[in-house]
Structure formats: C-alpha cells, structure tokens
Image: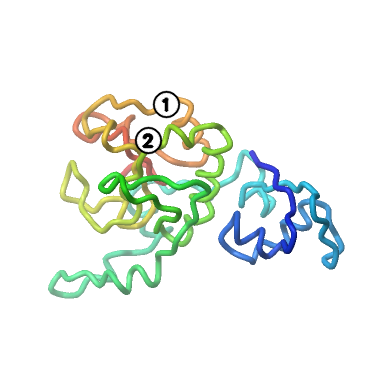
Amino acid sequence: MKCQYVIQPEDTFEKIAIQFYNTPVLAEKLRQYNGLYNPAVIIVGQPIDIPLVLDLNGAAATQRTMPQPQGYQQILDCFGNIYDFFDEDGGFDESAWCAEMMTTAKLPFPVALSWDHSRQIHKVRCHKKMAGIIQDVFFALQQEGFADEIITLGDFYNFRSKRSSGKLSTHCWGIAFDINPEINAPGSKGCMPGELVTLLFDFGFTWGGSMPGKHREPMHFQFCSGY
C-alpha cells in the first residue's frame, strides 16, 4: 500500500520525508526506494512512490509490524514496566513515564476528537515503538478509502483503568486507540466496518469488538492480546 507524490518546486527529500513520515531521517531511504541514486538531482514534476514506513525499511508486506505481545508480561517486556514509575505511596510519575516511553505520530488526515468535535487533530501521542506502526496504519486506512469512516478518535495514550475492570488500560502504554466511540459504545455490537477491522488485524491489532461480554468494546484496537 502506497501513494504517489509529485515533486514540487523547492522540495527536498528531507522535506518530503517530514511531510509524510514526520521525520527527515527516512529521506535517504525514500530516495533510494525510488531508484534515484544521485542525491544532488531532484526533478520538479517527477512522480515518486511514498510507501509505508515499514515497507520503506525493507519489511516484507506480511511482516510489517513487530510481533504482537501476548499477555501481561510480554507487554511489560516490550513496552516497559510502568510499575517502575510508581513510588512507595502509589503515586505515578506520569511526566517521567511519558518522557521515556511516549512520542507523537503524525496522521495523514485530520480527525475530530470524540470529546470535542470542534478540534481536528493531526498527530497523536503513543508509545515510541508504535509511532511508525500508527503512521502506517492510518496511511493504509486512507489509501484503502476508510478516512471518511473515521469520524472521531478517542483515547490513544491515556493513563487510566480499563472501563470493564480496575486493572490498567492498554492506553497507559500508548499501544491502543479508539475509533468513533460515539457509535461503538462498550457492550454494544457497534458498527465498525469489517474490512477496517481486517486491515488493522493485518497490522497486529486486536479488536475490542471481538472480546466477550462486558469486555466488548467495538471502538477499541490494541497492539497486544491476552490482556
């Protein structure tokens, strides 16, 4: 899954990489991906391919993401032991946790916040290991025609408990997000398009709509299972 971009006046590959990937670091790989081996030459009007981040890094289409953690211990091993950031009195040092573990991911299209429809966001806060995957996921959603299906976004990173229990939510690790919460309430069947669910499954996400009973959350996608 990829799109094309036509090189504009005053473009550089660094500028193009920032525009699509939110970082200039991938500029050289983008240039090489398009078979342009002279870094001094950039041709205005030339179309180039803009692939997914993980495809740009040479990952096979069937292995676009890191392995999905399974269960509580693998979440801690992969995304950090959040309990190391609690003090003896149970206080959580959220600023230290976020400084060490969180970053922002750029969205390829703006989406309204579920709690404030007047605000359109262009980036989200997530775990630093998830930024490339999040950007790829939303780029793929756009390319597959689902951008108009995503009316609002709920939580990405948010330090809170699960709605159905007292244990920490996967949002605490910045490895989950909610789509269209207003029409995909907890416990309901919801109305999430099956093709969208399948696409996110291919990227390694578990859908909350497949969870049983009170744990069912059709708005929710998380990059782990068994928790």
Q: Quadrant of the N terminus?
A: top right
Look at the image and name its color scheme.
Answer: rainbow
Q: Along the horizontal axis of the image, is 27 left or right of 157? A: right
- Secondary structure of the residue carrying numbered label 1: loop
Tag of residue 207: 2
Up/down of 193 relative to 8, above or below? above
Residue at the image point whose x is 66% and y is 48% from the top:
55
- Secondary structure of the residue carrying numbered label 2: strand
Mark 1 or mark 2, whichever is nearer to me: 1
- Alpha carbon distance from label 1 to label 2: 12 Å
Residue at the image point whose x is 33% and y is 37% from the top:
180
Name the residue type under label 1: Pro
Which of these two is toward me, 3 or 163?
A: 3
Q: Say how many tags the image has.
A: 2
Residue at the left extreme of this rendering: 89
Q: Quadrant of the C terminus?
A: top left
Q: Along the horizontal axis of the image, is 218 left or right of 145? A: left
Which of these two is toward me, 180 or 80?
A: 180
Q: Along the horizontal axis of the image, is 104 left or right of 183? A: right
Q: Which residue is mark 1?
A: 193
- Rendered location of residue 122, percent (x, y): 45, 53
- Rendered location of residue 155, percent (x, y): 31, 49
Label 2 crowd (10 A; few <14 / some 14-19 / many >=20): many
Residue at the image point whose x is 59% and y is 57% from the top:
21
Up/down of 214 relative to 93, above or below? above
Q: Along the horizontal axis of the image, is 84 left or right of 7? A: left
Asked whether the beta carbons under mark 1 and mark 2 sit within 8 Å of each other, the answer is no
Name the residue type under label 2: Trp
Up/down of 147 relative to 158, above or below? above
- Rendered location of residue 44, percent (x, y): 80, 55
